[in-house]
Image (cartoon, rainbow, N blue to C red):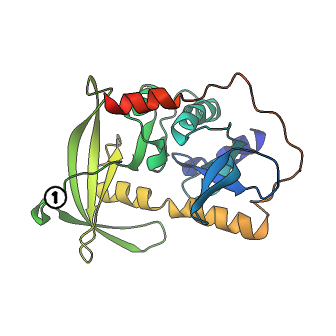
Amino acid sequence: MSLAQHHIESRPSAVGLLYVDGHVRAYHGKAEISKAHVARMRLAMPAEIDTWICDRFGDGLLVWQAPVGASLANELRLVATKVRSLLGEDAHPTICFDRGGWSPKLFCELIQGGFDILTYRKGPVPAKEREAFRSYSFTDELGRQQNYLLADEKIVIGYDRNRMSFDCRQITRLDEQGGHQTQIITTRDDSDPALIAYAMFSRWRQENFFRYLRTHYGLDALDAYETTPDNPDRLVANPDRRDANRLV
């Protein structure tokens, strides 16, 4: 936490937007440990997951080993607690993450805690007509011109079997060449939606950070062969209950 605090004090403008993601370290030994999806290998295999918080430039701020079976959505609650302790009660940062953190109920908790959220919408969404999109452009911090075709609107997302709802902003980007539409969900109120789209699509900075650490600093290395027993009190999903819920 001391290093993170030093990072914040030396680059305060970099922590208004924070990227959060899990990084998987594959295990190739003989011990029986839990599995995780290793994206670069495109399969599930024994592994450990670290949760990383990076600043708006993709540089690491905090990291810890995630509990066995933890989802990104569950980790975001801990992220919010740690970020709040570092930035103070008056800060109003934006937490950006991928679809693995999708949970409208969690989004409401984060908003009540003084955070904005920025993520991709999960699930199928009807495509918009071409007439719904407008051209936006701006110059980024590196002097590059960024151009987007965007549709900006307010929406309501239901959850808990539509007994509860989450009000947010949806910014849809159209790839004019391929026709693909990407939906971004946020609670930010920037007047220019291109700034929000740019922030979302800049998640590659965190991926570049992982790639650099993997190449030069052994990010994927496991520092010991020793294993520790799993927590016998850890709650796990009941597969029968899960299957029953799908039938309701």
Question: Which quadrant is home to the N terminus?
Answer: top right
Q: Position of residue 84 (x, y in %)?
A: 58, 31
Question: Which quadrant is home to the C terminus?
Answer: top left
Tag 1 secondary structure: loop
Determine the residue positioned at 33% across, 52% down: 184
Indicate left or right for 156 with 63 as reference.
left
Residue 64 vertical placement versus 91 (above, below): below
Residue 122 vertical placement versus 109 (above, below): below
Q: Report which residue position mark 1 lands on.
A: 128
Determine the residue positioned at 56% across, 39% down: 71
In this rendering, does residue 110 appear at all? no
Determine the residue positioned at 80% across, 59% down: 221
Residue 18 vertical placement versus 206 (above, below): above
Question: In this orientation, which residue lies closer to the viewer: 137 or 202?
Answer: 202
Indicate the amino acid at tag 1. Lys
User: Which quadrant would residue 42 be assigned to in this image?
Assistant: bottom right
Residue 132 vertical placement versus 79 (above, below): below
Q: Position of residue 150 (x, y in %)?
A: 24, 61
Q: Residue furthest bottom?
A: 177
Determine the residue positioned at 64% across, 63% down: 209
User: Which quadrant would residue 245 be assigned to in this image?
Assistant: top left
Indicate left or right for 173 with 209 as reference.
left
Question: Label 1 crowding class (10 Å Cα cut-off): few <14, some 14-19, many 20+?
Answer: few
Question: In this orientation, which residue lies closer to the viewer: 247 or 116?
Answer: 247
